[in-house]
Image (cartoon, rainbow, N blue to C red):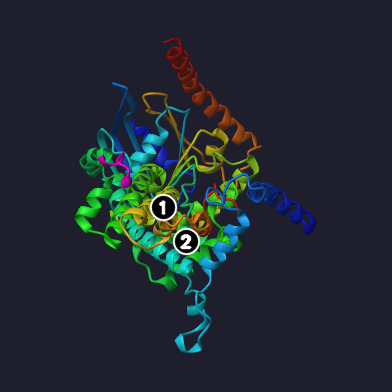
Amino acid sequence: MGGAGRLASLARSVAVPAALLLAWEAVSRLGWVTPLILPSPSAVALRWWAYLTPYQAYDPAAGGRLAWALSGELPHDAFTSLMRIAVGFGVGAGLALPLGLVMGARPLAYELFNPVLQLLRPIPPIAYIPLAILWFGLGNPPAFFLIALGAFFPVLMNTIAGVRAVDAIYLRAARNLGAGEWTLFWRIMIPAAMPYILTGVRVGIGVAFIVVIVAEMIAVNSGLGYRILEAREYFWSDKVIAGMATIGLCGLGIDLGMSRLNGWLLRWHRGVEG
Amino acid sequence: MSAAATEGAAGAGHGGAPPGPPAIRCRGVRKVFSAGGRDVTALDGIDLDVAAGEFVCLLGPSGCGKSTLLNAVAGFSPPTAGELTALGRPVTGPGPERAMVFQEYALFPWMTVERNVAFGLELRGDPPARVLEVVDRLLLKLGLSEFRDRFPKDLSGGMRQRVAIARVLAIDPPLLLMDEPFGALDALTRRTLQDELLRIWAEDRKTVLFVTHGIEESIYLADRVVVMTYRPGTVKRLVPVTLPRPRDPASPEFNALKRELTALVMEEQARHQADEAHATAD
């Protein structure tokens, strides 16, 4: 695609968002709705900038430039939420992956664990909030628990499906070349199931993202979820929307990163483009 | 039946096979599958000896059990009854001394060409320098050197089957089992690969058991063609092919054999068709 084509493509993809923003701005400026209900996009942008940037002027004595640049409220909130996702997801996926591999490969393990998992799976992680607070109190631990729970099932279910879908011919070929059970597991089943596993990871991260916001609204006093609820207490609608936009951007960033990782890990896979 | 088998072995084309114990020995091999509550006898009373270094084709219409017999020798699916030994040992499971080339290639798609070929050597615990040396040699031999870092999805069917052959040759198995390996290839690629296979076979005289439904292919390749009957699969006729290699498919001798084998296979194909028609009528 040439430069002009790329420009036209860019124009097509920003046309509708730009029109919507303009309409929204007009509606607010004309005073059809009060700023409390729907602040104008320009007001949100200003608030977002204030939320993003440091409170204090740069002071070389206090630390480096990067630390200063990230000392605003938003970077701190975003980092807190992302750290919770990382820990919670790590725990949830870290438990789901080995269990899923064993359940997929061994019918006995599947028969033993499947009933209880099917019983627990339909319960949304949000429903565990009261118990999570009873068990873990307030703060990070209940958030970790809820996020881990949210990430656990998508990774587990996809891993089981992935291992079960491994084409028997790969197992035959590997056995024929002298592979034992352990080799089959590590060098055949896991890579062959990787497309499914990564789908589970992607869904799991999505769920973790939802759960972290809810957990922060209820069980913890920091992070993006906490911040937008706090802003509502003060009727700072512009800050609520700025926080929501931040959540959206973080999610988009994670998804793009995952998509890149997927593309690289599955570069051997037929279904993956470029 | 075993008398016929011995007679066939004596007529083996290359004539240089040492009179040792057979590489494959089947006695009364029978295989019954249970499918949908019904027992289907896929193989019955198979008596067959394949001499060391011999190239034998199993020929017959689909449903004649030729792949079943090959899978039994490979150790994927043990016979229901009978005696089956390979390289002097009873077959109890799959093993690298009886390496298989599959029609569907069965390359590991997540491994590059190089990793695929190295797989069996790594499993055996060969030192990395030795693995590299063998892989280099085989990639060169099969014209794959420039594709070593490609993934199987980026290769043509012919190239994939070359990789599968290289992967098997890497572990230097005395017995090579091939399940319609060239069945999915176009005619020209098939001929090229047949010639390469014969060249490789002429170099190190592995024992080859080759399943095909291609009459011409079996005459082109084999020392001996085992024509099998349709369900239950039994040995219908052992046909030695004594034409000198390279064989000319246009020669009168080749065509005489082709006529003979076609007549034998078509008898079984007719039974297969009748069976299909019967199944449809049900």
Neighbour tally class for label 2: few under 14, some 14-19, many 20 plus, Cα within 10 Å: some
Does residue B18 show up?
no
The reply to whether residue A260 is visible in this rendering is: yes
Please name the residue shown 57% across and 48% down the image.
A34
Question: Picture coordinates of residue B256 (x, y %)?
Answer: 59, 30
* Left or right side of A116 for A21: right
Whether residue B243 is in magenta: the answer is no
Quarter of the image with the N terminus of chain A is: bottom right
Mark 2 lies on a secondary structure that is: helix
Inter-mark Cα distance, 1 to 2: 27 Å
Q: Residue at x 28, y 51 (%)?
A: A99
Q: Give the quarter of the figure containing the C terminus of chain A.
A: bottom right
Q: Which residue is mark 1?
A: A201
| Residue at (56% x, 66% y) in the render | A49
Of the two numbered discs 1 and 2 in the rendering, the one whose residue sits closer to the viewer:
1
| Residue A235 place in picture, x, y as percent | 47, 54
Q: Is residue A121 magenta?
A: yes
Using residue A28 as the reference point, say whether residue A230 is left or right of it. Answer: left
Residue A107 percent across, percent down from the top left: 26, 41
Residue at the (51%, 74%) spot, across then down: A54
Q: Which residues are magenta?
A: A120-126
Q: Amino acid at mark 2?
A: Arg
Identify the residue position indicated by label 2 in the image: B115
The single residue placed furthest to the top in the displayed view is: B281
